Amino acid sequence: MSQAEVMVTSRIPPFLLAGLQERYTVHDREHIQDPRVLGRVRAFVGGGEGKIDAGFMALFPQLEMISICGVGYDGVDVAAAKARGIPVTHTPDVLNDDVADLALGLMLAVARKIPEADRFTHAADWLDGPFPLTRKLSGSRLGLVGMGRIGQAIAKRAAAFDMQISYTSRNPRTDVPYAYFPNPSALAAEVDFLVIITPGGAGTKNLIDANVLKALGPQGYLINVARGSVVDEAALVEALQKKMIAGAALDVYVDEPRVSAALRALRNVVLTPHMASGTTQTRKAMSDLALANLDAHMAGLPLLTLIPECRT
Ligand code: 8YV
């Protein structure tokens, strides 16, 4: 029997590509040489931000499922997939620890100025005098925008730093002990560190705007490990330039991998290259789960981790 044909729609980890190549005939969206391939592809495999819109899906008459390697799937037109009865899977849970670890790392990095202190020490600037004092993290107030699985993993770690934890989300949760605020502005006004960990997409676009940053205030820090689209980046640059907030630590951006020159020029920001889930262990686990979903589909078995919209 000939192997099923699948298409890689955006950059995926090497282990996932290797796993796909063992079992399937793998095509790459960027290098379609034979247009007849479009009529044979049965599944897409890709990262969650890679654009899979209705027009692209329409090119593939035999498309049966979409396996996303990532928890977020904001690049996928889910309504269009559902309209065609195409299930979409993603890779939740396996990356919670890593994303939460990086959120804590970024909070420490920006508050304690670790990257700046590292540069200072490497440059032997210490010889000219001590490094300036920094901001204490332990015991301070943390506000989480989003209280899903990763938000809860961040809260658990923050509790070990004796932080006072509060959050906002569409609805208050009954299963967490943290204080609830009805919107990001109300939350921002009450915290020292505002951490964004909510899904991207149209529903959260520019949720963190100039008003929220104003509420966070000159002693407050913004940390984003969600999606660049959730923060109004122009408003953030202005707030940082005018010292309307104390600083920011960002792992995600509006136009990745291009990071705005204005952001890169600022001293009071710590910038990382969308690496929150980027450990060998976690990318392997994500790859295994993305592959397991695809394999289950091809074997006619129930899918392991459907996105919520496809569970009904
Ligand atoms: C991935 C992520 O690196 O899971 C997510 O939503 O943002 C990251 O873990 C990204 O989706 C690329 O696949």
Image: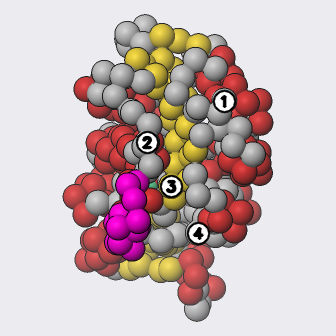
Q: How crowded is the residue under tag 3: few (<14 C-alpha within 10 Å), some, or many (20+)?
A: many
Per the model, the C-alpha gap separating discs 2 and 3 is 14 Å
State which region is magenta.
119-131
Q: Nearer the viewer, residue 268 or 23?
A: 268
Q: Nearer the viewer, residue 92 or 167?
A: 167
Q: Amino acid at mark 2?
A: Thr
Q: Secondary structure at mark 4?
A: loop
Q: Earlier in the sequence, mark 2 or mark 3?
A: 2
Q: Earlier in the sequence, mark 1 or mark 2?
A: 2
Q: Residue at x 32, y 55 (%)?
A: 286
Q: Residue at x 52, y 27 (%)?
A: 192
> Per the image, is 294 magenta?
no
Q: Amino acid at mark 1?
A: Gly
Of the numbered discs in the image, which one, if any, rests on residue 270?
3
Q: Nearer the viewer, residue 291 or 70?
A: 70
Q: Tell whether label 3 touches label 2 (CB within 8 Å).
A: no
Residue hosting label 4: 257
Q: Tell whether label 4 touches label 1 (CB within 8 Å).
A: no
